[in-house]
Image: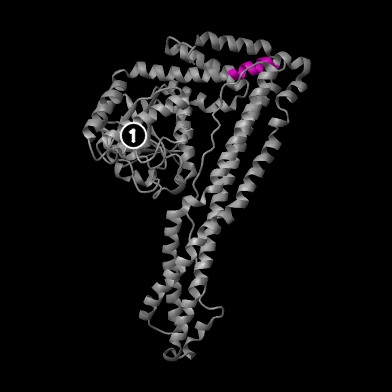
């Protein structure tokens, strides 16, 4: 994109975008649909510039925005909270507009937005919220922009991830929040790579800066810049923030350097961002059109041979699907043994701890055998549930080994597919494809629940009225205590099974993502090869139009 200079006016951009839209529609470039839609929306609506805060879940995005705004309008919590894209801008009175996917718009009091934007009140976005728009008089100084809160990436909630990623092409200025208690991860670098095709303005925000000393802050910033230079060959501005210490200083710097600068130069900044998006779209479109032109030039001579050379067995969709299926099944097969082996170390300590607690608690239980049995069942449920939930919470990272290995294998398979396809295209057509960011999202599984068994193999407690407890109570107490190892073993096995299902479901979800990536790319290439017969002149004309509008 460095060799493309901007059109000189909005009318130039409009004409350029119409050419790109025509090319995308004519040659079914489905992979560019979202970028095209985002650029068209910006051009037609001319909205405030969206300053979006993105990043992994629990990076402190909502807390940062609340602090920056000066009031707590966005939900925060100890688990991934934000469900829908939320935009905050100036308005003469406080209000919130809920925009649903079906086009309906509902105005609600500001105090009620948590019912639509939090995971607790709107689980799985069951209320079908597309976007929440908040208007605040306190945003008067920033009338040229909107602050955007996004669902966290990498949370257990898949739709959080897809909501944020689907919205990325609309971003104006991107603030990537990275928590001080986490390093700059590969997921953050992937996000920066993707953002590079959508906006010229990418800023790193180091949140929770108060947990680092000044020396450590400098070390982290240096690490960020070294990593960016090594991996992406660029440097990005880094800002510190904390809602606990030096907040006024941090806030003032962000307001002066970012927010006020955007507002002061709103029109020129909007033009620059829109033009950047058009350039990115142009590059991708030109790459596809060059494939189409070369295909058309050779089509009449040997179309089927051309298709066979490009879409050979190395990039055959059925074969790649089969390979991905083998990868998934191999890692899923290893999940249960790995989890059971790791959990075995907790069986004996859990059994001893539970027996000791039962021996203390059971002496205070009163009543007949039926009541004691129900008390025992409740005790097992509460005690083992608590213990196993703690194990699940504290140790679950050790259960994800096969998922992480599967992720690496899927990523390697996709990289190999992309290389084979690009090599085929370059060899056959002499066209080098633009780089495609193959990225598989890792979804951490949900935490499973706990169960318990009946205390007796037969319904002995149903004849409690025939059993004198003053004679047999000690016998039943010993029976309950003797049953604890069985309960511990069963529930540890159940925990392993449920984590196996969760991990394997996550592996299957990654497999489906990989298949979808491959299907869309092959569909685009197939359309270009199969639909270009006798269209050389038309394609050449489009390429000239796009290049003329761009240079």
* Above/below status of 350 relative to 164: below
Residue 330 magenta-highlighted: no
* Above/below status of 483 relative to 189: below
Residue 294 magenta-highlighted: yes
Q: Quadrant of residue 81?
A: top left
Q: Residue 45: x percent and y percent?
A: 41, 23
Q: Nearer the viewer, residue 269 or 174?
A: 174
Q: Helix, strand or loop at disc 1?
A: strand
Q: Is residue 101 visible?
A: no
* Above/below status of 239 relative to 302: below
Q: Residue at x 29, y 37 (%)?
A: 209
Q: Residue 270: x percent and y percent?
A: 38, 19
Q: Which residue is mark 1?
A: 206
Q: Residue 239: x percent and y percent?
A: 31, 29
Which residues are the magenta region?
287-295
Q: Residue at x 52, y 39 (%)?
A: 441
**Position of 333 compared to 207: left or right?**
right
Q: Quadrant of residue 129?
A: top left
Q: Residue at x 78, y 18 (%)?
A: 302
Q: Is residue 280 visible?
A: yes
Q: Nearer the viewer, residue 99 or 406?
A: 406
Q: Nearer the viewer, residue 454 or 18?
A: 454
All told, the count of numbered labels is: 1
Q: Nearer the viewer, residue 435 or 542?
A: 435
**Magenta stretch mostly in which secondary structure?**
helix
Q: How is the image coloured?
A: one colour
Residues packed near mark 1 inside 10 Å, few (<14), some (14 to 19) or many (20 plus): many
Q: Residue 401: x percent and y percent?
A: 53, 48
**Position of 104 compared to 112: left or right?**
right
């Amino acid at each position: 994109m460095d060799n493309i200079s901007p059109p000189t006016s909005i009318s130039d951009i409009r004409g350029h975008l119409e050419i790109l839209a025509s090319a995308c529609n004519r040659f079914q470039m489905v992979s560019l649909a979202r970028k095209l839609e985002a650029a068209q929306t910006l051009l037609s609506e001319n909205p405030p510039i969206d300053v979006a805060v993105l990043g992994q879940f629990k990076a402190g995005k909502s807390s940062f925005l609340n602090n920056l705004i000066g009031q707590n309008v966005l939900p925060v919590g100890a688990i991934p909270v934000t469900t829908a894209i939320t935009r905050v801008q100036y308005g003469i009175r406080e209000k919130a507009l809920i925009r649903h996917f079906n086009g309906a718009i509902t105005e609600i009091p500001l105090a009620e937005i948590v019912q639509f934007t939090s995971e607790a009140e709107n689980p799985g976005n069951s209320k079908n919220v597309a976007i929440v728009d908040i208007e605040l008089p306190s945003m008067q100084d920033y009338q040229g922009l909107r602050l955007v809160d996004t669902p966290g990436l990498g949370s257990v909630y898949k739709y959080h991830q897809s909501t944020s990623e689907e919205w990325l092409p609309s971003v104006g200025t991107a603030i990537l929040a990275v928590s001080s208690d986490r390093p700059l991860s590969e997921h953050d670098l992937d996000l920066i790579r993707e953002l590079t095709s959508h906006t010229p303005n990418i800023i790193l925000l180091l949140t929770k800066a108060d947990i680092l000393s000044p020396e450590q802050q400098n070390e982290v910033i240096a690490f960020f810049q070294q990593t960016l230079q090594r991996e992406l060959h660029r440097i990005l501005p880094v800002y510190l923030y904390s809602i606990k210490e030096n907040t006024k200083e941090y806030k003032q710097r962000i307001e002066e350097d970012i927010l006020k600068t955007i507002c002061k130069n709103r029109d020129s900044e909007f033009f620059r961002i829109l033009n950047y998006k058009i350039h990115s779209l142009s590059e991708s479109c030109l790459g596809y059109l060059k494939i189409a032109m070369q295909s058309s030039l050779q089509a009449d001579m040997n179309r089927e041979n051309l298709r066979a050379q490009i879409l050979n067995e190395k990039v055959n969709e059925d074969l790649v699907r089969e390979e991905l299926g083998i990868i998934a099944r191999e890692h899923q097969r290893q999940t249960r043994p790995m989890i059971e082996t790791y959990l075995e170390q907790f069986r004996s300590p859990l059994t001893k701890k539970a027996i000791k607690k039962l021996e203390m608690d059971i002496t205070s239980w009163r009543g007949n055998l039926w009541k004691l049995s129900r008390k025992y069942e409740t005790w097992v449920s509460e005690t083992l549930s608590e213990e196993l939930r703690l194990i699940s919470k504290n140790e679950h990272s050790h259960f994800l080994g096969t998922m992480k290995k599967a992720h690496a294998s899927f990523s390697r398979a996709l990289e190999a597919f992309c290389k084979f396809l690009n090599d085929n295209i370059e060899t056959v057509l002499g066209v080098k494809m633009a780089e495609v960011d193959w990225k598989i999202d890792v979804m951490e599984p949900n935490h499973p629940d706990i169960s318990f068994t009946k205390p007796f193999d037969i319904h002995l407690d149903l004849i409690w009225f025939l059993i004198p407890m003053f004679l047999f109570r000690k016998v039943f107490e010993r029976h309950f205590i003797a049953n604890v190892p069985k309960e511990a073993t069963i529930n540890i096995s159940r925990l392993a099974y449920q984590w196996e299902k969760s991990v394997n479901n996550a592996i299957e979800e990654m497999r489906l993502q990989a298949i979808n990536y491959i299907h869309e790319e092959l569909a685009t290439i197939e359309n270009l090869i199969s639909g270009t017969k006798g269209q050389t002149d038309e394609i050449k004309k489009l390429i000239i139009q796009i290049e003329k509008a761009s240079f």
